[in-house]
Image (cartoon, helix red, strand yellow):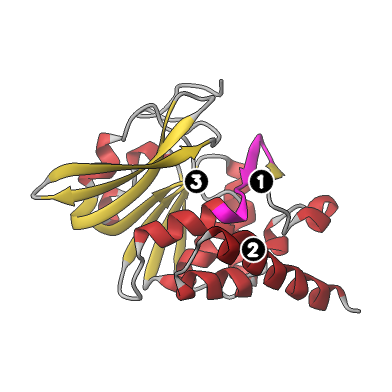
Amino acid sequence: MPVTDQFELERRAMVARQLRARGIRDERVLAVMERVPRHEFVPPPLRASSYDDNPVPIGEGQTVSQPYIVAYMLEALEIQPSHHVLEIGTGTGYQAALLAELAREVVTVERVPALFIAALDLLAKLGYTNVEVVSGDGTRGVAAQAPFDRIIVAAAAPEVPRNLFDQLSEGGKMIIPVGSPEMQDLLLVRKVNGRPQVQQLEGCRFVPLIGEQGFTHRQ
């Protein structure tokens, strides 16, 4: 059986066993998780683990997040086809590809040069034209392209960065892990009358968000 067919079978199984079985119900999220080739964003030596129920290392101390937590965050954001989305922590671009299929346009920020280059190459190779990859400090956001309808942060911050909240549109939503480098809570932050309304979702563990409004160095 060709490898591409095997990966397709593994994606279907991932969606059925890891996502639907755990309560993910957004059919648009489930469809893109089944469609986007996660294995393309994983280093070749680890591709056999691409659809496992855990994060996969991508180098530079970073990971592609566990499929369930990716789907959970996307579902919580309720992304619409008209939305302008900011992603913090591109990695190799897997979540950016999912966002590109859900939203009108995506701006994604990556701090690590090698991952920034990898994401540029992979997203172009796969034909995503509505994603702009930016190199820099994710805690600063991308003020020139604000406001954003949705913001998704794929690294843990000690608190919600003010820069990111300021770049959220009125009525918009941000999802972000907040806590210590060892353990965090996933927060859903809404901007209502210019103020944050915060809902605590579930415990999680992400790599630290490094930057002027994040952690100063990897713990």
Quadrant housing residue 201 = top left
Q: Quadrant of the N terminus?
A: bottom right
Q: Is residue 65 magenta?
A: yes
The residue where tag 2 is placed is 122
What secondary structure is found at the residue carrying circle 1? loop
Location of mark 3 (residue): 89
Camera-side mark, 2 or 1: 1
- Find residue 55 and name its label: 1
Q: Quadrant of the C terminus?
A: top right
Q: For the residues marked 3 and 2, what is the alpha-carbon distance in whole angstroms?
A: 15 Å
Work out how far the residue at label 3 is from the one at label 1, CA to CA, in angstroms.
Answer: 14 Å
Does label 3 or label 1 sit earlier along the sequence?
A: 1
User: The disc labelled 1 sits on which kind of residue?
Assistant: Pro
> In this view, which residue lies farthest toward the right?
1
Residue 103 location, quadrant: bottom left
> On the rendered structure, is 174 left or right of 129?
left
**Viewer-nearest of labels 3 and 1?**
1
Q: Position of residue 205 (x, y in %)?
A: 54, 35
